[in-house]
Amino acid sequence: MAVLVTGGAGYIGSHTCVRLLEAGYDVVVADNYYNSSPAALERVKKISGRDFKTYEVDMLDKPGLEKAFEENRIDSVIHFAGLKAVGESVEKPLLYYRTNIGGTLNLLELMVKYGVNTIVFSSSATVYGIPEKVPVTEESPLSAINPYGMTKLNIEGILRDCQAAQPDLSVVLLRYFNPIGSHKSGLLGEDPKGIPNNLLPYVSRVALGIYPHVNVYGGDYPTKDGTGVRDYIHVVDLAEGHVKALGWAAENKGAGVFNLGTGEGYSVFEIIAAFEKACGRRVPYQVTGRRAGDAPIVFADCRKAKAELDWAAVRGIDEMCRDAWNFVSKNPEGIK
Ligand code: WQD
């Protein structure tokens, strides 16, 4: 029996595949390599010492995706595949709704057809919008402030509705905060194509000398130093949360929702300073205007994941930055 990992060649997906294989699960990966590389899967095999089947397929290609179900005994799914750039989602909402929601509907219909009763979904703290209160709990108000966030919110609702209609279905919604860092080998890491939207990959490329400075989006927020505060979590801690989620699903039917964060908030300036310490280089920056849609402060209350998943993040900000630098300094051209 195997876990089907959609988007398994991606940043979080590849790190999760390593932990699944190390935990003894069999894995099947489906990925269209739109924002990833098949080379990442070869590195997953190298790190884990285990082989697994891969399908180069788009989630919108239902017949192609069905091959993964026809040719393997799939008993659970971890669903990462989807578009994830907030800014792009504002420019191309239909692409995001079609890809993220349409792809998920294809997956769910195939799960019903093949009797697969467990799905762990890659949701996001973006479903909290601009929170009134922090830390955010799983019961905090939900709101979408961009089409990307709306797709996450809609897919959470679709999964809850499917579970209500099919009581033997186990659904786990994992709301990630800000994943950063890399596997300690330096073989896997965040490797966005094009100009990074997220802070860490951009800071990394400034440290490499690819870009001249970081644009700090806003220095006048009501925060400790005026810059945006986020809950950064090591991607390996996040990957381990998915293994725990499968354990929860094996014991529980119904829909579970969990914040996967550290409960700590760090500002942009603190991240830049931590990264400079990790890489031993200066990271110049310029404070610019705020980015539309950014919240001043977002960080998690993750007591529920500790209590019900027996999971907590254990890696601190220095380790996150050290591991992130280890990856980019070993792979300045990304994963080829
Ligand atoms: C972090 C902080 C920015 C870039 C988003 C999505 C979330 C997930 C992660 C997909 C903020 C500041 C950033 C830069 C900056 N997406 N910043 N200069 O916006 O918290 O979360 O990405 O998985 O769902 O919502 O992450 O890294 O873009 O921003 O000053 O060049 O860094 O203003 O305060 P964000 P981010």
Image (tube, helix red, strand yellow):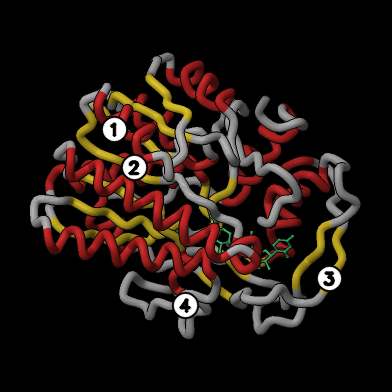
Residue wearing tag 4:
134
Residue wearing tag 1:
3
Between marks 1 and 4 in the image, the one whose residue lies nearer the viewer = 1
In the image, residue 87 sits, relative to residue 69, either above or below, namely below
Identity, as a three-letter code, of the amino acid under mark 4: Val
| Residue 285: mark | none
Rendering quadrant holding ligand 1:
bottom right
Identity, as a three-letter code, of the amino acid under mark 2: Ile
Q: Earlier in the sequence, mark 4 or mark 3?
A: 4
Residue wearing tag 3:
287
Secondary structure, mark 2, is: strand
Query: Between marks 1 and 2, how big is the CA–CA gap?
Result: 7 Å
Residue at the far right in the pictured view: 212
Query: Between marks 1 and 3, how big is the CA–CA gap?
Result: 44 Å
Secondary structure, mark 1, is: strand
Query: Between marks 1 and 4, how big is the CA–CA gap?
Result: 34 Å
Residue drawn 36% across and 40% down?
Answer: 62
Q: Earlier in the sequence, mark 1 or mark 4?
A: 1
Near-viewer residue (190 or 7): 7
Which of the image's four quarters has the N terminus? Answer: top left
Q: At which x and y percent is residue 291? A: 71, 73
Q: At which x and y percent is residue 302? A: 37, 63
Q: Is residue 231 visible?
A: yes
